[in-house]
Image (cartoon, rainbow, N blue to C red):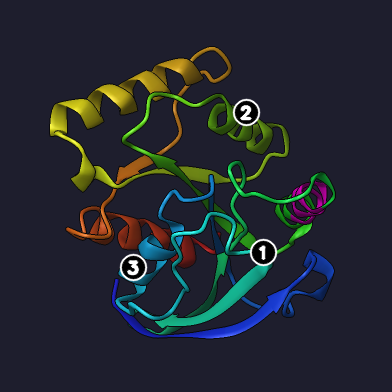
Amino acid sequence: MLIKKAKYLTSSPSFETCPNPDRPEIAFIGRSNVGKSSLINMLSNNSRLAKTSATPGKTQLINHFEVLSGSPEVSWYLVDLPGYGFARVSQRDRRRWEQMIEGYLRKRSNLSMVFLLIDSRLQPQKIDLEFVNKLGRWQTPFALVFTKTDKNKVAHTEKNVNQFLHALKESWEAPPNFFLSSATTREGRDDILRYINQILISGG
């Protein structure tokens, strides 16, 4: 899939104030510092689209980007959601973020797919496994993206990914779709975009 145009549209403090749900929406979420903004920029082929930062918790609102892709041309929203986990914020702010994210994921009517980003350098993290199970309880469609594969040896990445998928067997009959990615080497870009295109063609 060829992305012809991607531009920032707006930032919203809740799903109620998001743009009109008049087109398919693909969202990205993950633990803070998982490389979400870098992945979005890599997929869109625009290094300045989503703001990257070395400080976890930089994204604090629901960020919408308007995307035109494919032939025939399709218009859709790409959404950058706040991260969870390591951000140094107050309990009050953390709870506000959690409510904002849950409200969006459970009630956004045009949400077609959520890509949940997992750091491939790490062994399975409880917080990530718990979030996968939340998505299951909420019946939110999702796929996994294991990021930063360039930071590992291939065998190490495979071991961590397999351990994560094995841990899911405690709660899931079958593993979700998953992708390996690197914003540096651009690994996974074509596969993820092809998957998004299939979702858009099928109408979510």
In the rendered structure, which disc, 2 or 3, sits on the residue that comes first in sequence?
A: 3
The residues tagged by marks 2 and 3 sit, at their Cα atoms, a distance apart of 27 Å
Which residue has dot 2 on it? 130
Which residue has dot 1 on it? 60
83 or 176: which is nearer to us? 83
- Residue 81 sits inside the magenta stretch: no
The residues tagged by marks 1 and 3 sit, at their Cα atoms, a distance apart of 21 Å
Q: Is residue 2 left or right of residue 202?
A: left
Q: Does 135 sit above or below residue 87?
A: above
Q: Does 86 sit above or below residue 132?
A: below
In the rendered structure, which disc, 1 or 3, sits on the residue that comes first in sequence?
A: 3
Asked whether residue 197 appears in the rendered view, the answer is no
Indicate which label's residue lies in the foreground, 1 or 3: 1
Q: Does 153 sit above or below residue 197?
A: above
Q: Residues within 10 Å of mark 2 (few under 14, many from 20)?
A: few
Q: Which mark is residue 43?
A: 3
Q: What percent of the width, then of the height, locates residue 196?
A: 41, 61
Q: Amino acid at mark 1?
A: Gln
Q: Are marks 2 and 1 in contact (CB under 8 Å)?
A: no
Q: Is residue 123 left or right of residue 1?
A: right
Find numbered disc 3 in the image and state the secondary structure of the residue it sits on. Answer: helix
Q: Is residue 184 left or right of residue 7?
A: left
Q: Residues within 10 Å of mark 3 (few under 14, many from 20)?
A: some
Q: Amino acid at mark 2?
A: Glu
